[in-house]
Image: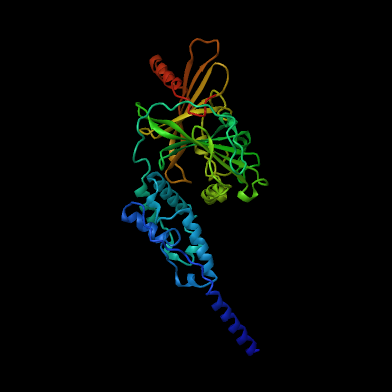
């Protein structure tokens, strides 16, 4: 028996030694173009990210032993492909900043560094002090967009090409309804998140874990621009992104179909099917939320960590907000509020401007979403009426009767002059 154990151990040792001869390289290029940031911020990256996301070879002694070495090599090369902090400085400043925000958010959400990595490399953990250093450097909203002319109003082409994965563009998104709105200080953009009828009903019923098949989201993004009156408005159209839920058809991509169409011509993003990995990789930290970052405005409290119940506390309105269609938005930085202008699509004039306070998005550092309701302003005129009427509903649900005629006319003029956001024209 002892002889058998000795022989077995000897064979095992020889086999393990033979494995060490199979050692594909982990390249360590000399190229260095690191991001320009204060030492306190870059040290966080060096301590927690460089082991995988850099050209530097930083393997512990146990990482060098095959077959563990092969797994480490695969993870390092894959991590570099996603982001390489040794060469990030060669990228456009906006790309560098976006990458750092993504790194901060992945760390804040506990998605990076991988727990399987930090269990053996505890020094790579990101603690609260590390996050504070990164966030202080990134400092969203430290600048304001430049004043620019009104963007050109564009119509949505119905013949936009599908993505390389075969997901078709849905031109009907302009008639979908509001799920939420995001003020992004990390990259100076606005986003309206719209949902089709299935998605809106699911949000109102609290059926978001998981979302039902047939739910569709459209995330419409614009650059921010400052207006002379101090408001920040939607500027040039950037893109529209779609998420389509079909657990069977998109089984390999977490049950969701992903697509993005960029620029005035709505060019589909992605030269090959690998572009979907960007989507699934970014949304992976939201696995517990069925991969959805957005917190839809909903009164349903069954999923308070997934639904924005605070923003849904709105008094009775002149028309059903769920059935209304958003047509533009703006932010008042001085008041820390966000406003969305809706139309209910009836004949005549029927506009509703809802204003909320803003709150930090708990799912994304550098973003703000609606918080408590502030006011609702209704401008209404039937098709046979010469002059519209104006009503303002206050925070407590009462109708504000303190405004004189000139103030009402000023607010009506302001609302009527708000420009429709590009690609939300009807």
Q: Is residue 297 at all visible to an observer of this figure?
A: no
Residue 369 x/y as whole percent: 46, 38
Q: How many marks?
A: 0
Residue 252 x/y as whole percent: 63, 51
Instruction: Locate the N terminus by quadrant.
Output: bottom right
Q: Is residue 304 left or right of residue 408?
A: right
What residue is drawn where x is 37% and y is 47%? 138
Examine the rendered structure and indicate whether residue 279 appears above or below residue 84: above
Q: Is residue 89 left or right of residue 393?
A: left
Instruction: Locate the C terminus by quadrant.
Output: top right
Q: Is residue 285 at all visible to an observer of this figure?
A: yes
Specify how the rendered protein is coloured: rainbow
Furthest-right residue in this view: 248
- Asked whether 297 or 265 is in front, the reply is 265
Examine the rendered structure and indicate whether residue 49 appears above or below residue 215: below
Examine the rendered structure and indicate whether residue 216 appears above or below residue 152: below
Q: Is residue 180 left or right of residue 404?
A: right
Examine the rendered structure and indicate whether residue 231 appears above or below residue 186: above
- Asked whether 336 or 195 is in front, the reply is 195
Residue 111 x/y as whole percent: 50, 55
Furthest-left residue in this view: 38
- Asked whether 425 or 95 is in front, the reply is 95
In the picture, residue 140 is in which quadrant?
Answer: top left
What residue is drawn where x is 34% and y is 26%? 228
What residue is drawn where x is 43% and y is 49%? 99
- Asked whether 425 or 300 is in front, the reply is 425
């Amino acid at each position: 028996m002892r002889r058998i154990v000795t022989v077995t151990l000897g064979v095992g040792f020889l086999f393990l030694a033979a494995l060490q001869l199979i050692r594909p390289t982990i390249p360590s290029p000399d190229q260095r173009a690191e991001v320009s940031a204060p030492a306190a911020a870059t040290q966080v990256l060096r301590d927690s990210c460089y082991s995988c996301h850099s050209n530097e070879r930083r393997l512990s002694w146990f990482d060098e032993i095959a077959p563990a070495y092969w797994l480490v090599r695969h993870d390092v090369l894959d991590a570099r492909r996603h982001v390489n902090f040794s060469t990030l400085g060669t990228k456009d400043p906006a790309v560098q900043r976006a990458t750092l925000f993504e790194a901060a958010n992945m760390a804040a959400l506990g998605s990076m560094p991988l727990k399987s990595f930090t269990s053996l490399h505890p020094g790579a953990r990101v603690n609260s002090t590390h996050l504070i250093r990164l966030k202080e450097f990134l400092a969203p909203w430290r600048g304001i967009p430049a004043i620019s002319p009104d963007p050109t109003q564009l119509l949505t082409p119905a013949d936009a090409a599908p993505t390389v994965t075969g997901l078709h563009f849905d031109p009907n998104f302009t008639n979908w309804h509001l799920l939420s709105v995001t003020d992004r200080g990390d990259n100076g953009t606005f986003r309206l998140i719209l949902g089709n009828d299935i998605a809106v009903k699911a949000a109102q019923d609290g059926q978001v874990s998981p979302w039902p098949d047939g739910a569709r989201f459209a995330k419409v993004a614009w650059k921010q621009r400052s207006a002379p009156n101090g408001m920040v408005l939607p500027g040039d159209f950037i893109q529209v992104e779609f998420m389509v839920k079909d657990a069977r058809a998109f089984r390999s991509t977490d049950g969701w179909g992903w697509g993005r169409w960029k620029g005035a011509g709505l060019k589909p993003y992605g030269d090959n099917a690998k572009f979907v990995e960007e989507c699934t990789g970014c949304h992976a930290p939201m696995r517990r939320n069925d991969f959805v970052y957005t917190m839809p405005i909903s009164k349903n409290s069954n999923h308070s960590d997934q639904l924005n119940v605070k923003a849904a506390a709105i008094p009775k309105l002149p028309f059903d907000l769920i059935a209304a269609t958003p047509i533009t938005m703006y932010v008042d930085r001085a008041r820390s509020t966000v406003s969305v202008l809706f139309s209910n699509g009836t004949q005549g004039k029927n506009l509703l401007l809802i204003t909320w306070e803003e709150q930090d998005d708990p799912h994304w550092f550098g973003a703000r979403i609606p918080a408590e309701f502030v006011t609702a302003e209704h401008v209404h005129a039937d098709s046979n009426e010469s002059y519209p009427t104006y009503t303002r509903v206050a925070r407590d649900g009462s109708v504000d009767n303190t405004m004189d005629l000139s103030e009402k006319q000023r607010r009506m003029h302001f609302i009527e002059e708000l420009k429709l956001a590009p690609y939300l024209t009807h």
